[in-house]
Amino acid sequence: MILILAATALFTPFASALYVEVPDYNSGIASAGVKDVINGRYGDVIFATDGGISVYTQNGTWYSVNARHPDETPYGMIAPLETMVTTVALDASGHLWIGYPNGLQIGDGTGYRDIQNLQFLKNLNINCIARWGDEMWVATGRAGLHRYQDGEWTWYKPAGPEGLGSYTIVSMAVDAASDALVVGSESDGVRVLRDREGNARFEQVTCGSDTFRRVSEVRVDPFGGVYLFNRTTVLHYAPDAGVTPVLDADDLSTFPVTINDIAATREGMLYIASDNGIYGWNGSGVALHITSRDGIRSNFVKKLFVDAYGRCWFVVPGSVGYIPPMAGHAALSLSAAPVPTPVVTETPLPATPAPVVTPEESAGLFEGVRAFFEGLVGAVIPG
């Protein structure tokens, strides 16, 4: 089953009316403008969106908060600084850190401390946050990196003596196998920090003479190391083994495709978000290809995230959903729920008969992956 959470009102060929409801921040994701996703502390999944913070709970329900709708949550009373949330993270104590375009909020178990002072952060636009052991690393604007440990802030200047060499850091990941922090920058390449103790020294990641200045994104590999990627290529990096190629966009399709995001599963599948759907790479080739014909509503997939349960969340224009963990043959069905909107209308629509699906159309739902799926896509409106 693919779960879809639509940012527009729900409409299926079997519906006789279109319903748009009063905002209810306990019924769905606040917005499909997802900026960041993490696993929560309580078996939940936390989304940072341009409409606030949304949490998909362990029992399958939703709640959302933003600047206009603060609320009490399992992470304390959250009154966001503003509606746009750029990133979220949990520290070693399980407290929530929330980044915004104009500051940072840090939970302490009882409340939240607002950081909007240039004494602590040299730029208030929070790009991304990563936990490394008991430390929190915060990338801000074009101001490089900040480290928080035991109540103390340390600033690593873009051109400082530590060798960061990067102004705008857009992604970070910790390689648990080597205990190293890998950071990707907008245009200054990728750096690695191997040692947290003593004097920090960042090293540039290279392959021969290539400094990967056009590679900006870093993602965790559950088997050790990290993935590096841009719009055309995916690489693997481990501090002890160096850089190895994984795939190019040409390996995914005979037609040109653009890589937008990647996410690796514990089963060894690498999901690739593209402008032609979601590809599954099994190490030697394409083992899976999911497109709008299979229920994800759009071929332009912007973001992916594999949660603690093995579900692969995806973000497409106007919708958010997930692909459940797959084992053997599985049949797809489609569930949908509308994201709250501030308008109340009920517009009658002409009844539409159920579409007739030919055997040829059924066979075309999954190109090259019949071994994974059987059946047709259905549409189910939650009651």
Image: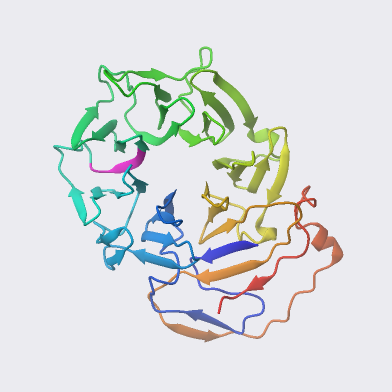
- Magenta residues, dominant SS class: strand
- State the residue in front, 22 or 200: 200
> In this rendering, would 168 be left or right of 351?
left
Residue 211: % across, % down: 47, 19
Residue at 33% x, 42% y: name it.
92
Quadrant in which residue 343 is drawn: bottom left
Tell me, what colour scheme is on the image? rainbow
Quadrant in which residue 216 is drawn: top left
Which residues fall within the magenta stretch?
124-130
Q: Is residue 73 above or below residue 245?
A: below
> In this rendering, would 131 be left or right of 110?
right
Residue 329: % across, % down: 76, 55
- Position of the N terminus, as image quadrant, is bottom right
- State the residue in front, 149 or 147: 149
- Asked whether the viewer can see residue 227, the reply is yes
Q: Is residue 47 magenta?
A: no
